[in-house]
Image (cartoon, rainbow, N blue to C red):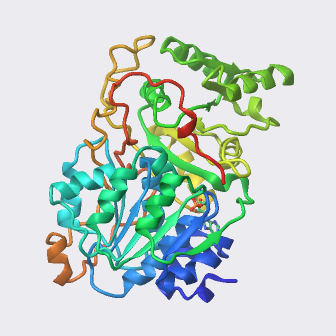
């Protein structure tokens, strides 16, 4: 069934085609008509099923009718998901006049306030804490919200956001459409759902069939000489419980292994000339938590089946798009979800552009808050002197939308009556750093976190 038969307006169908989708996924076929019909919805679907387009596309269709104002709100648990959802929304909306924006914690709030006040957005993707902060500072009005989405709702509750969700619900108009997507339904979430949704329709989804579909991807732009330092920070991030880090060469893998060990990580290297047995033992150590990180080359990873790897990190951008797909296929295997991050130096922009062309879509750019991108060089071995704080207060941050697009004048109030701007921001392109996000909640102690608690690991349906 083509997208055009789902009742979506032509500019949205055109946007979807431009992204490279030919047919809707099962959740899209089921959910889009329900959402277009104005019903509340509970989607038992995990990342990888195409759930983002399942709610974003009909929401954009709705937003195309009516005046510009902040009318749709998508709440997500993490900055990476926030960045991904907003990137998708921009891609799908590229042939409309609609604007999407994103806010999340861990970075200064000022640029987000300016974005909300002066540019205005129709659809906002937000993490709950930062949204409440912005609302407390009267930088955002939620009075016009018509559609609320709780995305990866179980993970939000897992991460302690239930009270924030309740506070946000109280700030929203009672008459609205609410959509909730969640792989599981823990009791706490059930309570939130009862408060948030009115006679919801349910869509239950089989797990994704394509292995690579369950992966949240992000690009971390950084100078070559700061990659190790940045990787060190990324490995301390929320939910990084077991990671495979890819380097292009064996020597590079050895060097990186030593550097990470000096910084206090538990790391094993997967050498290309090791036997299958040795490689499998290294992977078993990773899976059982005896080591947190495996540093591997492409060759070493071939033929090895890994489940429950939370992160694949490309320390070097792979030479070919096929290698990229193969590498990130190490996470997000059938039924699983995972994150795939790529550290990209300016010299590697071309390789990333080739990957994005191959994938047919852009990958969100992410900056690590509190990371000194201007420092002179990586410090081998020293970790005490590098700030570990992820912002202390998880709400004390910002996200930056640096993709350009001139203000269309006035605050959100002014926009209601004002003319819609014509200078649309372009969809993300490779090489345009777009976000300065942070995971939230942050580690308020600013210390190395213990391995992830099981509750933080993503669960399956
Ligand atoms: P999601 O579950 O929303 O995270 O989507 C998983 C992946 O599937 C993302 O990379 C989407 O770009 C992709 N995707 C979503 N819908 C479609 C579709 N109809 N056809 C092909 N790929 C899709």
Residue in the image at 45% along x and 82% along y: 61
Indicate the quadrant of ligand 1 in the picture.
bottom right
Q: Quadrant of the C terminus?
A: bottom right
In-front residue for pair 416/381? 416
Query: In this view of the protein, can residue 303 be seen by the observer?
Result: yes
Quadrant of res 206: bottom right
Tell me what residue is drawn at x 33 percent, y 37 percent: 369
Asked whether residue 87 appears in the rendered view, the answer is no
Residue 263 pos. (x, y %):
48, 15
Across and down, in percent, residue 289 comes to: 65, 24
Residue 67, compared with residue 295, is above or below; it is: below
The quarter in which the N terminus is drawn is bottom right
Left or right of 401 in this view: 410: left
**Numbered circles on residues, count:** 0
- Residue 191 x %, y %: 46, 59
Residue 222 image point, x, y percent: 42, 36
Residue at the spot 71% in from the left edge and 34% down from the top edge: 298
Q: Is residue 215 above or below residue 347?
A: below
- The image quadrant that residue 443 belongs to is top left
């Amino acid at each position: 069934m083509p997208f055009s038969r789902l009742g979506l307006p032509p500019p949205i169908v055109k946007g979807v085609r431009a992204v490279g989708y030919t047919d809707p996924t099962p959740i899209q076929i089921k959910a889009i008509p329900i959402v277009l019909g104005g019903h509340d919805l509970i989607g038992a679907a995990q990342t990888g099923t195409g759930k983002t387009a399942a709610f974003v596309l009909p929401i954009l269709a709705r937003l195309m009718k009516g005046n510009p104002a902040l009318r749709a709100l998508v709440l997500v648990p993490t900055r990476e998901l926030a960045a991904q959802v907003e990137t998708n929304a921009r891609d799908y909306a590229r042939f409309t006049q609609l604007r999407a924006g994103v806010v999340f914690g861990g970075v200064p709030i000022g640029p987000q306030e300016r974005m909300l006040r002066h540019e205005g957005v129709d659809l906002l993707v937000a993490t709950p804490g930062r949204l409440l902060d912005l609302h407390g500072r009267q930088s955002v009005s939620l009075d016009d919200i018509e559609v609320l989405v709780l995305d990866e709702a179980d993970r939000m509750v897992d991460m302690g956001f239930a009270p924030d969700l309740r506070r946000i619900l109280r700030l929203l108009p009672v008459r609205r459409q609410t959509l909730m997507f969640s792989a599981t339904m823990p009791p706490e979430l059930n309570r939130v759902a009862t408060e948030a949704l009115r006679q919801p329709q349910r869509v239950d989804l089989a797990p994704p069939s394509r292995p690579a579909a369950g992966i949240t991807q992000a690009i971390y732009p950084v100078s070559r000489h700061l990659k190790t330092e940045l990787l060190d920070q990324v490995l301390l991030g929320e939910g990084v419980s077991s990671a495979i880090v890819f380097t292009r060469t064996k020597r590079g893998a050895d060097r990186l292994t030593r550097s990470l060990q000096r910084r206090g990580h538990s790391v094993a290297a997967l050498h290309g000339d090791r036997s299958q047995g040795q490689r499998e033992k290294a992977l078993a150590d990773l899976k059982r938590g005896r080591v947190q990180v495996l540093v591997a080359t492409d060759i070493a990873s071939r033929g090895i089946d890994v489940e429950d790897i939370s992160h694949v990190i490309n320390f070097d951008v792979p030479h070919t798009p096929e290698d990229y797909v193969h590498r990130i296929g190490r996470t997000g295997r059938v039924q699983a979800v995972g994150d795939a991050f790529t550290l990209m130096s300016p010299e590697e922009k071309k390789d990333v552009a080739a990957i994005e062309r191959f994938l047919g879509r852009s990958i969100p750019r992410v900056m690590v808050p509190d990371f000194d991108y201007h420092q002179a060089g990586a410090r081998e071995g020293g970790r005490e002197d590098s700030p570990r704080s992820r912002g202390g207060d998880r709400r004390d941050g910002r996200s930056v939308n640096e993709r350009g697009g001139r203000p269309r004048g006035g605050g959100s109030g002014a926009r209601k009556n004002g003319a819609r701007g014509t200078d649309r921001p372009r969809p993300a392109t490779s090489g345009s750093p777009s976000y300065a996000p942070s995971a939230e909640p942050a580690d308020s102690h600013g210390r190395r976190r213990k391995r992830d608690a099981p509750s933080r690991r993503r669960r399956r349906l």
